[in-house]
Image (tube, helix red, strand yellow):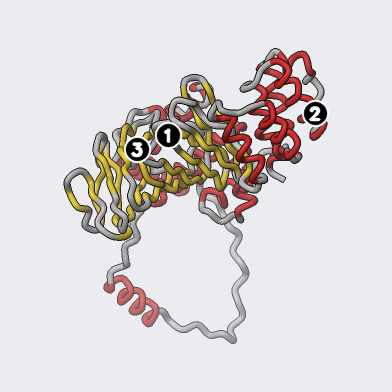
Amino acid sequence: MFSQHINKQLSAYCHGELDEAEARRVAEHLIGCQRCRRDFEEIKLGVRFAEQLTTDSAPASMWTAIEAALQERPRTDTTRAKPARRRFEFNGRPVAAACAVLLVALAVGAFWLYTRQPNNAVQIAGSDKRTNTAQSEVKPALMKPQASAGGSAWEVARLEGSPMVGATQLDGSGRLAVGQWLETDNASRARINVANIGQVEIEPNSRVQLVETNAQAHRLSLMRGRLEATISAPPRLFMVDTPSGVAVDLGCAYTLEVDDAGRSVLHVTAGWVALELKGRESLVPAGAVCVTLPGAGPGTPYFDDASPRFRRALARLDSHNGSANDLSIILREAREYDTLTLWHLLSRVEGAERERVYERMAALVTPPQGVNREGIMRLDKGMLDLWQKDLEWAWFE
């Protein structure tokens, strides 16, 4: 995690110019830093404005006139002594008039761009609200409600085969409206542009629905199949419903797969994702996996290089078929960064088992000042959050 603000990296991050490790660190910092997140939103807005500008070629007549003027210009005698350099005299009136004209032109141009931009501005206002940013800090111009381009629909493109939008076969590209289903067979793939915040690729044998898209939330429902999401947005703006939980984007890239029984597998490749259902939450960082079963709530995350014994024992605990021996396997196999799993287990076991988890965690990573056994045993939220923040360095080694 960064201890300093990351303003200098934001432009490169927005344009995808950072390497994977640096981009991950920036994304992690943006999750917890409102100041840098506001700066990032302003940079993204500027990029959106720039993308609206068009480039026109100068008419051929202009170049002809320039060439003619150059030819008519009298040749100067290069051997003649150069005149003394004239002292520049500032005349304020013409300059002031020119500046006024320029400001008016810029204002008109900005207004024209703003009224034609997609719903990015209103997304920023809504996303700051969802991340507890004070509304007084958001510029008034960004608070103006704005309908999204093309209405409540997202662009979708065929990548392979014959994807279907509703009852219509997708030929090249089209639109996915709120309430519509996108389906792929075993030879089809498609890509969805998620408003202005990223893309989702839909793999074969998948069924996904656009549930909502507005200033406060962009939501898909994945009933079966596999998707790969790459999102660049404030936390909690993009979500994917599954039969066993809700994947809430915290600024990241990930794959999400749902089988015919409703079992889901989340694999995060950059940033963070939260899996949520009925008050239960799993925080899944880059490099980690979380398996969730219908009716059981979000599973317990683990890193993808955990031992097979560790993963099998955790699966039994998550399915409520585990035993004290399974917990012993997990504690024995746990490495320093497997405290990710142990931290989640603290609130999922009770009594003596919670104490065993605490002791193993404390042996792997010394609790920070302000965290003690008594507080963790009673699941003091402040202590749990403090320990989580302190553990993150181990999770991203």
Residue at left 31%, top 74%? 65
Going by the numbered disc 3, the residue's amino acid type is: Met
Query: Residue 129 — which label?
Result: none
Circle 1 SS class: strand
* Mark found first going from the N terminus, 2 or 1: 1
Query: Residue 239 — which label?
Result: 1
Q: Taking the image as drawn, is residue 182 in sight?
A: yes
Total of numbered circles in the picture?
Answer: 3
Going by the numbered disc 2, the residue's amino acid type is: Ala
Q: In which quadrant of the rendered view does residue 286 lie?
A: top right
Q: Determine which residue is flagged by label 2.
A: 362
Residue at left 48%, top 39%? 233
Q: Determine which residue is flagged by label 3.
A: 223
Find the distance from the CA under tag 3 to the CA under tag 2.
Answer: 40 Å
Disc 3 + disc 2, Cβ < 8 Å:
no
* Mark found first going from the N terminus, 3 or 2: 3
Disc 3 + disc 1, Cβ < 8 Å:
no
Residue at left 33%, top 46%? 206
